[in-house]
Image (cartoon, grey):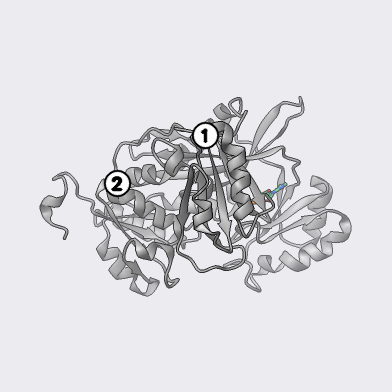
Amino acid sequence: MTTANAYPASQTIRTIGILGGGQLGMMLAEAALPLGYRCIFLEDAPNCPASLYGEVFTTEQLDDFVAAADVFTLEFENTPAKTVAWLKQLSDEGTKQGMFPPPEALEVAQDRLNEKNLFNELGIKTVPFMSVNSKAELKEASSQLGLPLVLKTSRGGYDGKGQFVVKTEADIEEAWASLGDAVTGKGNLTPTPAPLIAEGFINFSREVSIIATRAQDGTMRTYDLVENHHHNGILAKSHAPAVGTSHLLPAAKSAIETLMTHLDYVGTMALELFVSKDEQGKDTILANEIAPRVHNSGHWSIEGAVTSQFENHIRAVVGLPLGDTDNVYPSVMLNILGEYPDLGELLKIDGAHYHTYHKEERADRKIAHVTLMPNDVAALDQAIDNLVRILPNKMGL
Ligand code: AMP
């Protein structure tokens, strides 16, 4: 099917190798195909969402995967940094045409302490934090940072897992008992021994995220701030754009652009932020974490932005100009967790765009999402209510 004259003569990249084969890989492949690029995936999980969109190689078939792709990217941030570094090296030697984002971005994102230290080095504000290697250090952190504090594994946690809120001194024993193993590498909390991070507990007013894409020539395009609502540590709902946040956009934009430039980043990245009050009572943003990949809080952009976060990521990876990131319409994205809703009922909702991930149902698993973009913006809240009513898992909404 693929013949030499099926592509523009200048197109030397045909196949994008994606590390990971989850729903993010699936949506990257959907965005790549209209531009003339096919994706293949490195993934050990059988019947992964991306398997309907391109060939899947297991890690045992790494060499075949590498041979079949021209350029590489990732959709799973806990990809071994060593693999990413090797693919970057092949690209530097001219055997392959790139590994984006660079391994440095992954190393930062895989370790909360590195990440927060980098934020502060670059002048990006965070909650106060300390590294914790022992119960004594946890006690010290509780007196320096004050209580409550949030104790987190610095590596390997996701969707609120590997976290403990220490409310009173009496919780210290239990917090250490549940997370202390991460420091020694015992148990299965983290892939390698690593200190914990204690963070001051922040009474944030809102959680927002900013997504941006950086091209190979350093050009950057930023999406509007999005407001995120979590349930049990998992993203439930994103409003795009976040209403009433235009005063925060310049600082958020500057933070993500500073990070991307510093990391010589190529591709789409997300920065999660807390909105809280500074000493003068003014709204301020505090950086929580980056995702060195396309992000769940950007799924709305498939329908809601001129160019989606997925398409812009693909454009960056293959060296094409980036597209306009403006919102075409206010939109709200809801995740579907655990159990599928009745599609016949769901699609009666005006402006509902449904995306299944072709996964089997399992409690609290992200199996699909819906972006609501009713033609009448005033009907958005009603559309959310109508959708939540038919969702088996209402995610606290
Ligand atoms: P994270 O894994 O860091 O994204 O944390 C998961 C969720 O826990 C966040 O979305 C917040 O709702 C909450 N959280 C994390 N860190 C803090 C903190 N330092 N203070 C208060 N809430 C937090």
Q: Residues within 10 Å of mark 1 (few under 14, many from 20)?
A: some
- The percent coordinates of residue 188 (x first, y second) are 62, 72
Precedes in sequence: disc 1 or disc 2: 2
Q: Determine which residue is flagged by label 2.
A: 318
Residue 49 screen position, x and y as percent: 43, 63
Residue 244 sits in quarter: top right
Q: Residue at x 43, y 53 (%)?
A: 103
Of the two numbered discs 1 and 2 in the rendering, the one whose residue sits closer to the viewer: 1
> Residue at image x 59%, y 63%?
338
Q: Is residue 245 placed above or below 238 in the rendered structure?
A: above
- Which residue is labeled 1 in the image? 330
Q: Secondary structure at mark 1?
A: loop
Q: Secondary structure at mark 2?
A: helix
Counting labels gives: 2
- Taking depth in this image into account, of 317 and 393 the one nearest to the observer is 393
**Structural distance between the alpha carbons of marks 1 and 2:** 29 Å
User: Does residue 100 appear in the picture of this structure?
Assistant: yes
Q: Amino acid at mark 1?
A: Pro
Q: In which quadrant of the rendered view does residue 127 lie?
A: top right
